[in-house]
Image: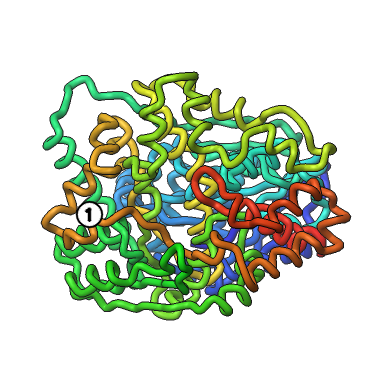
Amino acid sequence: MCGIAGELRLDGTRPDPAVIARMTAALARRGPDGEGAWQDGPVAFGHRRLAIIDLSPRSAQPMVDRELGLALVFNGTLYNYPALRAELIGRGHHFHSDGDTEVILRAWAEWGEACVERLEGMFAFAVWDGRALCLVRDRLGIKPLYYSLDGRRIRFASTPQALLAAGGVDTGIDAVALHHHFTLHAVVPAPHTLLRGVRKLAPATTLTIDPDGRRRERRYWSLAAQRPERALDAGEWQAAIHDGLCAAVQRHLSVADVKVGVLLSGGLDSSLLVGLLAEHGVGDLMTFSVGFEDQPEERGHEFEYSDAVAAHFGTRHHQFSIPNHEVLDRLPEAVDAMAEPMVGQDAVAFYLLAEQVSKTVKAVQSGQGADEVFGGYFWYPRMQAETAGTPLERFRRHYFDRDHDEYLAMVDPRHHGADHTAALVAARLAEPMADEFIDQVLRLDVTMLITDDPVKRVDNMTMAWGLEARVPFLDHHVVELAAAMPPELKLASGGKHVLKEIARGLLPDAVIDRKKGYFPMPALKYVRGDFLAFMHGILDARACRERGLFDRAYVDKLLAEPEAHHTRIQGSKLWHLALLELWLQRNVDG
């Protein structure tokens, strides 16, 4: 788990080492255990290391094999690297390290770009073979990879901030991205980002760039959401999911040379991770929970559930309570850790939790992905119950933060344009190999929406503290199996029916049968007092007014009654505006 960066010149010159150094320095928090740089002709790589597997210098990066003519920088973890290593040794390869980085290097030598289909885990990496640069991202986009491209060069990095540190990036607002951002809870699907000069590689994709500027992009994996030829009954599906999850949580725990803990929110998902590990005899588990101050409308913690799970399994539990004044004081710091603006309330929660957890362990398992893979959110049954309209209409009525008319009223006329989000979502829902409407919706969520919301949020906020987060529910074998399962086995019982059945008898009933919760931070949902004053200051700042992104009448309306304006999934519309503006002020204006 690391931070990677690099540059390929397309104009016959050599990269400037000072540029690589600036990019690498901007990634320091992602890799506190070491740094490295390498350059050869038109290409240069930089790396910051978080040592999780093979802690020795033998797995330092950039990793270069002059005999093979390959150089590699890699961020992530391969959970099947021991098996791949053994296979490659059987094919005559010799290894000089015990980690997963060299496995990628030698797999590339053996199978070329096709090796990516053999890799299991979370990864983003770049390979130079003397003829071309290839960028690769894992199937679900768990690990980030951004790039900037012009006629002279391509630069890549784990964060946009590293590209901005290199200089020469067009920081104008991307109109398509802006529309997505305010419609899909700050999700901006690849290749767009909010900045015109920064793109990102899509999940399950390779991008090859030749020194003459020619590009080839390939999608190497897609998700089918169709029933298998042999119908399975409910018991068979439950057994299959149970076995798949057990294998995933064990892989995510055992493939490490450091202690791996669990982020325990008190919800079903993280509690089930603890339960499955305990079920298979894993002892001395360390668990971690965070909570915040209550508001009259909503509690700020779920300690009664996380405490019950920790006590039930005898974990070494760590509980952290964060007062509102600390949340407000640390908000700008958390925003600095966001590769892109993220409006989810739990982004700040994860940031503050990761700070504490990183003092004890270097890697954790987290429950992200279970709601999207197994149908846990309240809007899925509402969409399913709709009978009128196209798939897009059934989806947007329960999900979009703003319809297009409101978006046009919100932004300055200079940013008006087409309904980009509707066009994208309609196209993705219509892709083949999905049996039912809810299959289409869940596949869209798992393969696009989740990448730039909870998955990115967890990566950014944990890696800001040199903490690796692993997400077993997004093991691609589990995802493929769940996608083939009938929707009713997901949506029954108020959502995640099959997980609740697996948990029955393993977890306390109170955890299984409770109303679904979130990582709550009420102060960012019910905006008042110091938090309202904070957002007012951001949106009334000279930088905001000069940027002219928002219609001032719309801003004033939200400031006057912030609690009267929530999205369909109960996010604060005022926080959406304030967060984007704050991110721009701290990342672009400076």
* Rendered location of residue 503, percent (x, y): 18, 53
Residue, x 22% and y 55% (percent of image)?
512
Q: Quadrant of the C terminus?
A: bottom right
* Disc 1 secondary structure class: helix
Total numbered labels: 1
Rendered residue at 68%/66% (across/down): 26
Instruction: From the top left corner, tell me how far across and down residue 80 is, in percent.
Output: 33, 50
State the image quarter where residue 48 is shown.
bottom right
Q: Specify whether 273 is left or right of 181.
A: left
Asked whether residue 344 appears in the rendered view, the answer is yes
The residue under label 1 is 513
Front-most of residues 183 and 150: 183
For disc 1, the neighbor class at 10 Å (few under 14, some 14 to 19, many from 20) is: few
Using the image as rendered, state which of residue 306 and residue 254 is in the foreground: 306
- Residue 382 occupies which quadrant of the picture? top left
The amino acid beneath tag 1 is Asp
Residue 181: x and y in percent read: 64, 44
Residue at the spot 73% in from the left edge and 43% down from the top edge? 410
Residue in the picture at 81% in, 50% down? 552
**Residue 36 appears in the rendering:** no
Question: Is 337 drawn above or below residue 206 in the view shown?
Answer: below
Question: Where residue 502 sits: x, y (%)?
Answer: 17, 49
